[in-house]
Image: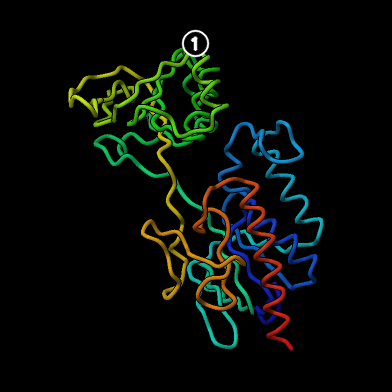
Amino acid sequence: MTEDGMYDLIIIGGGPAGLTAGMYAMRAALKTVLIEQGVAGGQVAVTEQVDNYPGFIEIGGFELCEKFLEHAKWYGLEILEKEAVAAEPGIECHSVRLSDGTLLKSHAVILATGGTSRQLEVPGENENFGKGVSYCATCDGFFFRDKTVAVVGGGDTALEDALYLSKVARKVYIIHRRDAFRGSKILQERVFSEPGIEIIFNSVVTEIRAGLGGVERIGLKDTQTGEGRDLEVEGVFIFVGFLPNNVLVPAGIKTNKTGYVITDEKCETDIPGIFAVGDLREKYANQIVLAAADGCTAALASAHYIETRKA
């Protein structure tokens, strides 16, 4: 940390977008600090396998994150393992306040705070979190070896984690509210051909019930007939989307109706010198390669912005 707390660039978030931004910022000779209170890599760190990142036919999510981190550190990027609690725009410079009261200042700020799992918001979900309810199959799948579990969702993450769970669980149900999945075709083909997976379309979870030993069953409702029934499961893995972690987004920055930050093609927000990247930013799709591209774009744009400020 600099003695006066002044940097060219502050990056908040250490996922693929933030770490890539850090690499390009260091290449541009910017005095940069990255703030990350948790595990570097974000959501990718809890993904079992990644097979769509260019250059790697297959690589573990945590291993890929380690490579991102190693590369960023190779450039000499300063990383603070602390919590950022506020990003405060200014006229001469912007500020980032940490949970310990430290105030850091910079010409530019890149918000790379990612997103968090969306909840079903049904009875029994919060009460049984960690007791059979999970949002990460690679984190908790081990505890459900030879058990029956349900995966809720129809996107890539739901299908990927259902396939992972089919390797350890006795049986996997995939419950989706529509009559077709939204996930990629290759994942759908794998799911349909996996004998350990049973698909329940046009259904939603209405309740999660538990006993002394944890989750025992879930309530289902048919979206077409309205009929309800119970399904005996010992675990529920929920993958129904993400919500942007936009708590640190300053007032005055435009967001869409779901809270994603609206930026221009440079990933710059309405406030000059403040950028939003990765899963925090509104865009067509959320992929690791796109998050990394955002980080690159924002860092290059930051360098240009900072150069004009110092001129």
Q: Residue at x 48, y 12 (%)?
A: 196
Residue 298 found in image quarter: bottom right
Residue 6 drawn at (x, y percent): 67, 79
Secondary structure of the residue carrying tag 1 is: loop
Q: Residue at x 49, y 57 (%)?
A: 282
Left or right: 299 in relation to 87: right
Residue 193 drawn at (x, y percent): 52, 14
Residue named by callout 1? 195
Left or right: 44 in relation to 257: right
Residue 26 found in image quarter: bottom right
Name the image quarter holding the N terminus.
bottom right
Q: Establish if 34 lies above or below 220.
A: below
Q: Establish if 107 lies above or below 199.
A: below
Question: Of 214 and 141, which appears nearest the observer?
Answer: 141
Residue 133 found in image quarter: top left
Name the image quarter holding the C terminus.
bottom right
Identity, as a three-letter code, of the amino acid under mark 1: Pro
Q: Establish if 244 lies above or below 202.
A: below
Residue 159 drawn at (x, y percent): 49, 28
Q: Residue at x 27, y 34 (%)?
A: 124
Residue 242 drawn at (x, y percent): 44, 46
Q: Residue at x 47, y 32 (%)?
A: 158
